[in-house]
Amino acid sequence: MPSNKVLEQKKAYVAELSERLKSSIAGVLVNYSGITVADDTKLRKELREAGVQYTVVKNTLLSRAAKEAGIEGLDPVLENTTALATSDTDYVAAARILCKYAEGSKTFEVKTAYLDGELISMDKLNQLAKLPSREVLLANVLGAFNAPIASFARAVQAIVDKSGEAVEAEA
């Protein structure tokens, strides 16, 4: 039987993990076995730069935290090694980075994911992973807004250039 101190630490960790799950808009669970230290360091750096929190978690503690957070259905995938990647602001960052890494690895695998507290299918996760980053999407939208204005500006400039040539020719 573990000591009271250890039990209190575990209860505090479960409460903290539960709060993290509740506050995140997206999360991905992976089996990280077989990953080298160098690859893990690169992967963690990429996730951190994208604003994703990535930690290794114990399956039993994650199961309890998920139940407290109201996320049902995680228990079947909570086997072997488990790491949790959560994001508070970006729906696709964790899925995109981890699915990309899993494609190139034989042992690293994505177990499941959730959006807004609801588990999603692997098909939906793969579709989510293929979406471009938020910055790319914003650039596309701004480009679409900018295109008509740019066309109008070129047309006005062409009229000005054409009328300027006619005046010079008459002089």
Image (cartoon, helix red, strand yellow):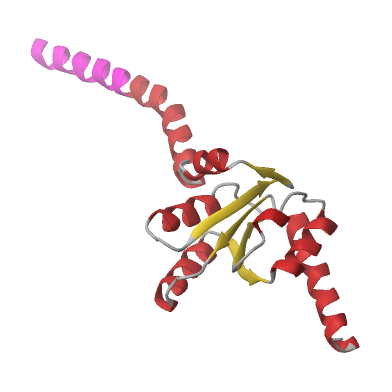
Q: Is residue 111 left or right of residue 145?
A: right
| 164 relative to 123, above or below | above
Is the C terminus in the top left, top right, bottom left or bottom right quadrant?
top left
Where is 43 relative to 10, above or below?
above
Question: Which residue does the image show at 52% across and 67% down from the upper left?
Answer: 32
22, 72: nearer the viewer: 72
> Within the image, what quadrant is residue 163 found in?
top left
Q: Majority secondary structure of the magenta segment? A: helix
Q: How many marks?
A: 0
Q: Nearer the viewer, residue 168 or 49?
A: 49
- Report the side of 70 relative to 158 (left or right): right
User: Residue 89: horizontal and vertical position, in percent?
Assistant: 64, 52
What residue lies at 42% left-to-right and 75% top-to-bottom? Answer: 36
Image position, residue 77 (x, y; %):
65, 56
Residue drawn at x 77%, y 58% is: 66
Where residue 41 appears, as percent x and y from the top left, is 46, 74
* Whether residue 74 can be seen here: yes
The segment highlighted magenta reads 154-171
Q: Residue at x 52, y 63 (%)?
A: 47
Q: Is 100 one of the magenta-colored residues?
A: no
Residue at the far right: name it: 4
